[in-house]
Amino acid sequence: MSESKVLSVEDLQTSEAKWVKLKKCTWRDPDGKERPWEFATRPTRGSGGVDAVAILAILRSESNAFPPSTIIIEQFRPPVERYVVELPAGLIDEGESAEGAAIRELEEETGFKASSVIQTSPLLVCDPGMTNANMKLVTVDVPFPEKLEMPAQKLEPGEYITARIVELSKLAAEFKGLSSIGFVVDARLSHMASGFELAERLRQAKP
């Protein structure tokens, strides 16, 4: 299989766009002055008002055979022309709940089947200065009686996703290693790993 790369870039008329639309709005600031703003929107948003989900899968051993871990994915993202490390994620179908989408997308992208939903975040925005895109983070439980095994993915045609298991306590170190060989880490995933690392440092620093 050949290496993914961007072959060309050209302007796209909003009327021709399928997944992203460009809008211009006028808003009033606290001083009463009207200002223009440009932003991108998702035309795929359903009646539920939530575009997408990201999935934090907690892989755990019921017999303590391995440390608590999670699953991350790697895929080429043309807008940044790099391979990006992310949480499993996907758009929510019309009539589908965030939790249902999370369980479905996790199994499609990684092969793992969640046994239950641990928690669902409130509505989150990703880059509010540029887009109105939103999402929810769904944390799911994936227990194993004994050893950890990697199941087969159920990717759709045209999807090229590599799934990777990482111990939760080693996420930050994993990202540093991947960054050193040219990968880019999704900001939300990096923030989560940094928070986990900082919390552990603070816990160890307590007298």
Image (tube, helix red, strand yellow):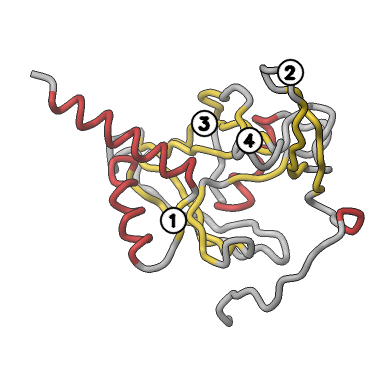
Badge 4 crowding class, 10 Å Cα cut-off, few under 14, some 14 to 19, many 20 or more, is few
| Residue on which disc 2 sits | 32
Q: Earlier in the sequence, mark 1 or mark 2?
A: 2
| Residue 159 to residue 128: above or below | below
Q: Earlier in the sequence, mark 1 or mark 3?
A: 3
- Proximity of marks 2 and 4: CB atoms separated by less than 8 Å: no
| Residue on which disc 4 sits | 128
Q: CA distance from mark 1 to mark 2?
A: 51 Å
- Proximity of marks 2 and 3: CB atoms separated by less than 8 Å: no
Closer to the eye: label 3 or 4: 4
Badge 1 crowding class, 10 Å Cα cut-off, few under 14, some 14 to 19, many 20 or more, is few
SS label for mark 1: strand
Kind of residue indicated by mark 1: Arg
Q: Earlier in the sequence, mark 3 or mark 4?
A: 4
| Residue 102 to residue 29: above or below | below
| Residue on which disc 1 sits | 164
Instruction: Residue at 81%, 35% (x, y): give it.
Output: 25
